[in-house]
Image (cartoon, coloured by chain):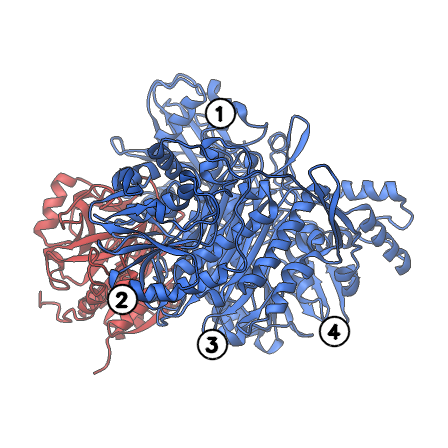
Amino acid sequence: MKPPRVLQLFAAGVNCDRELAHAFTRAGAEVVQVHVRELIRRPQLLRDCRLFALPGGFTYGDDLGAGAILGAEVRAFLAEELAAHHDRGGTIFGVCNGFQVLVRCGLLPGLEGVRASLTWNRTHRFECRWVRLRVEPGLGHVLPAGSILPAAAAHAEGRLVLGDPERDLPRLEAAGLVALRYADAAGRPTREWPACPNGSDGAIAGLVSASGRILGLMPHPERNLGPESLPDRGAGAWGDGGEGIAFFRGLLALDRDPAAR
Amino acid sequence: MTGAAWRIELELEPGRDDPVGEAARDALVARGVSMPGEVRSSRGFLLPAALRREDVERAIVDLLADPVTERALVVAPGAAPADGRKRLAVRRLAGVADPEGASAARALRLLSFPLGEEDRVESFRGLRLVGLEDVRPLLAAAARALANPVIEEVLPGDRPLGLHPAPRPRPAERREVPLREADEGRLAALSTEMGLALSAAEMAAIRDFFRAAGREPTDVELETLAQTWSEHCKHKTLTGPVHYRELAADGTVVAERHYRNLLKETVFAATRRLAPDWCWSVFADNAGVVALTDEIGIAVKVETHNHPSALDPYGGAGTGIGGVIRDILGTGLGARPFAATDVFCVGPAGLDPGELPPGTLPPDRILEGVVAGVRDYGNRMGIPTVAGTVVRHPGYVANPLVYAGCLGEIPRDCVDKAARPGDAIVAIGGRTGRDGIHGATFSSEALHEESETTDAAAVQIGDPITEKKVLDVLLEARDLGLYHAVTDCGAGGFSSAVGEMGEDCGAEVELSRAPLKYPGLGYWEIWISEAQERMVLAVPPESLDAFLARCAAHEVEASVLGRFTDDRTLRLRWHGEVVAELPMDFLHGGVPQPERLAELRRPKLAPTAWPEDADLRRLLLAALAHPSLASKEWVVRQYDHEVQGGTVVKPYQGPLGRGPGDGTVVKPRLELSAGVAIGCGLAPRIAEIDPWAGAACAIDEAVRNVVAAGGDPHRTALLDNFCWGDCRKPDRFGSLVAAAEACRDLALAYGAPFISGKDSLNNEYRVGGEERPIPPTLLCTAVAPVADTRRAATTPLKRSGDLLLLVGTTVAEAGGGSVAADLLGLADSQPPRPDLERAPALFDAVHQLLADGLAVACHDLAEGGLAAAAAEMVLGADRLGARLEVEQVPATGPRPLLGLLFAESPSRFLLEVAPADLAEAGSRLRGLPWAAVGEVTADSRLALLAGGREILGVAADELAEANGVQS
């Protein structure tokens, strides 16, 4: 069987491209990278891919806010093609800066009337540390709901803020758009530092679209490549090192039938 | 005010926490300003006045503002905010790079906003001061509290703000400098006037050359010689002749030696004698290269960026890391950076501003600034900063040290390079401006009075995304085989880059082809500008179009400046006219090198007098809180030390992520099982007492670090970075010679060759009219392959019931320069010295125990000795502890309790071994000093015993708290 094709976006300042491509390849994909300029010229490249991926980094230096410039570019020049890709049953996945771009260009959370943004961590600092992500029902089609996905958080602007958290959180949850939450060592969701490095509303680490095929998260599952990637090198407190690749396998296996979910 | 502009301030909505505003308020209060209310921060932009209001409003919604957290204040061109609120604006001085403004302009063009080619956008920081009547009285305090006056200004925000004026041009005609008739006095005056920093002998050699040539030099010829012959580029002190004398305490000469070339006869000579086949390139290129596998090599370089970091810690450290990354990109045909290191030496914490020499920033502010500089540059480049440390010492108050290192991976067939005659000289990356011309020699006062481009440009702000694009296109073009040679533009700019690449053939450059940041640069400014993020390549004519096309695809600016020739001459033109014509032989070989005197005084040192009693608990907790040991997690976690996914032994380790590691291990290629262990060592406090011992301990520490992490001691390569005082003074130079000899001695004894290095020899500061050197500071960086990273080692304890083995002997009476001696206020005494006979066998045995999986945790003994090492292994574990019997400690000489616990004798390790493996481990250690000194317990506590009696018990959380761990 032909391996599923991942089209991975490249742009000035993308810098997590190697590990993301490595993780997708290990999960069984064929990865093709494309520069954003090239993709804007030839958007038909999206037509033969199963999954469109936006890696982490600091696109254009994040000089105007994380993902702001690339987000504006995607919205201005690629919105229609991405919508068509999604309507064909394709998946769109963004991690870290890629997630920031998806939120900035409006693809996530994609719920009418809910404004969301990824802004400065409550500590107001870039922070790199391993976190535990609890899989929420919204992501149950990728990994078992309630299970823990250990991943490396590495961001300064990763706090999900909602226009009106008290009103918006229940709406997101009801619509099944909450994909991942930061959790403590016992697996309980928390907004408290350091288990949640940024103080996100609802302890949300990742969002998913109603279709289940547009997904973004701040921490990096593509850095969870095996036991030796983990802080305790696989002694057990951070899983067995298989959860990262399992996540990418799950993404690649998403049903292409738009009506299936 | 000039250049009227739309002004936008994006302020956080009321009720959103605003740490920037709070920090600004705190800084003002600390300066004695009374602040009635809160301070709210904003991101400010100045947009061209020609835009329509609806364009400005669309720009805010589509691009500039956060859609949830910010609201916008828009002020029309030439107007002031109409709401009567009190504001400040902090903005960069004219000529200082403004990446946010440049990015905004670029993005607006990209999104088809009507911006002309010449239109600029500027950014600034806005502050709204609630409850204040007038901001004018606090402007002076704000200028210091909220800005770095070297690069920024603080303006009242309730007045109109405009764009900076365009920089003023400089006349640019060919200019000769009359030199042939100049006498010694005139030569010295010229060197000073032109800022050439050439000695009398060097100026005379240049005069004699032009007398023989029968013409006067041009300004750019003198500038080129000054750059090429500078200490920074030529390392005249370390590579020149030395007369070295060792003096006893009474001044009698006890030893005397001559070196024709100090570095060649010490550090290089050791490398040449060892000459291992796994060293692929040593002291020849921008970095040394060693083998990782048969096909892949590791390029390593460490640089210093001290003086710029003292002036502007943030920009200085950023451009420091940016520069060393370019060294790696410019090694061979280009290595791909995969790890970075940083070491900072600053003054003590919490110094009162009154104790600071004039013009000096407080050490804490310097440290915060340099950490932020490395963070913002390294993180944006996507290179994990994985190793380093912070040293605090009063000697660094006025002269901080910033070391930045980088490692890259390179295919074996890319290690060699050579420009060929006919190749195009192509510059890529950033544009050329007046950045860093003659380094940052301008005082902040002068900058303040005349804040125009010419002066403010002495300070540089890095632009990491430009450098990232250069990295992307360079490696792509390398793999397509599109060029013959590459090097970075570092000190000396084009002058050094082209001069070095063309050394063996010749080069011709048309300076008017260099793209400029702004018009009006003189030709010599273009030639020696140290503008960042530029590389120079030798591209053969047949590949030129393909190369330029790759650059265009990545939006990297590329310009053909000229070509390499075969006449061994450097020829520069300015709009066609020849402005320089220098033979490469004179340029690279003409510098005269007089013999210099170096003297080392050896005081008589007593054995360390450890007190009989001390409060052990207090001493251990104080040691863990001492700046040398205190957790640097707050630094490390600001760096993305996991990017690229290959950081398999992390700087902070264990299930809680708080156990300090020794070396870090990084896999440059995720598909390979091999990785690289990286370690750093420095011992300035010991070097002050005995420079040979200080250097030897630094090297031993670096080697210990890589061995403890699983690196192979038989394949360990070293780098030297000497930061010293002014070595024209014999006493400073004397300690440098001793340190260079230590490098030679340890390299030979350990079989660990030096492969690259760098020196910075002018680190002096003035106290009450007296010039003082910084402490002699050798940073040794070690790298070693780890054949299978699954067998790499970490420091936290693993299993209760395991045994703790102490390997290596303790010399308690050599406690000089140790953390405990410092805490106890002991007088200078004998410092530790490695046992050169025995250390290699110890390293080998420890390595084999780790490689064969017999030891499951390993920590080297460093600052704080055995007690601190055991404490760190405990605090890194979760629900485990350790019990140690001091009487079991293997020692040489007297056995004072404090010495056994806190002496910092080199070449020692604490290993965790399962009881079942003890016999096998013991047989591997036969003939070496070792003992089982304790065991791993299940009680989250460190217990020290003497003769079976517990003399100290501390809970793991208490150890962690003293150490200042974050979580």
Numbered disc 2: what chain?
A
Q: CA distance from mark 4 to mark 2?
A: 51 Å
- Marking on residue A52: 2
Q: Which mark is residue B295?
A: 3
Query: Residue B352 shows which numbered tag?
Result: 1
> x, y (%) of residue B54?
35, 42
Disc 1/disc 3 C-alpha distance (Å): 54 Å
Residue type, label 3: Glu
Q: Chain of mark 3?
A: B
Q: Are marks 1 and 3 on the same chain?
A: yes
Asked if disc 1 and disc 3 are in contact, CB closer than 8 Å, the reply is: no
> Which percent across, then down, holds residue B589?
77, 61
Residue at position x 49%, y 23% in the image: B141
Same chain for labels 2 and 1? Say yes or no. Answer: no
Disc 4 target residue: B566
Q: Secondary structure at mark 1?
A: loop
Q: On the rendered image, what quadrant is the N terminus of chain B found in?
A: top right
Badge 2 marks a residue whose secondary structure is strand
The reply, left or right, for residue B731 in relation to residue B2 is right
Is A190 placed left or right of A11 in the picture? left
In the rendered image of this protein, which colour is used for chain A? Answer: red
The crowding category of the residue bearing disc 3, from other C-alpha atoms within 10 Å (few below 14, some 14 to 19, many at least 20), is: few
Chain B rendering hue: blue
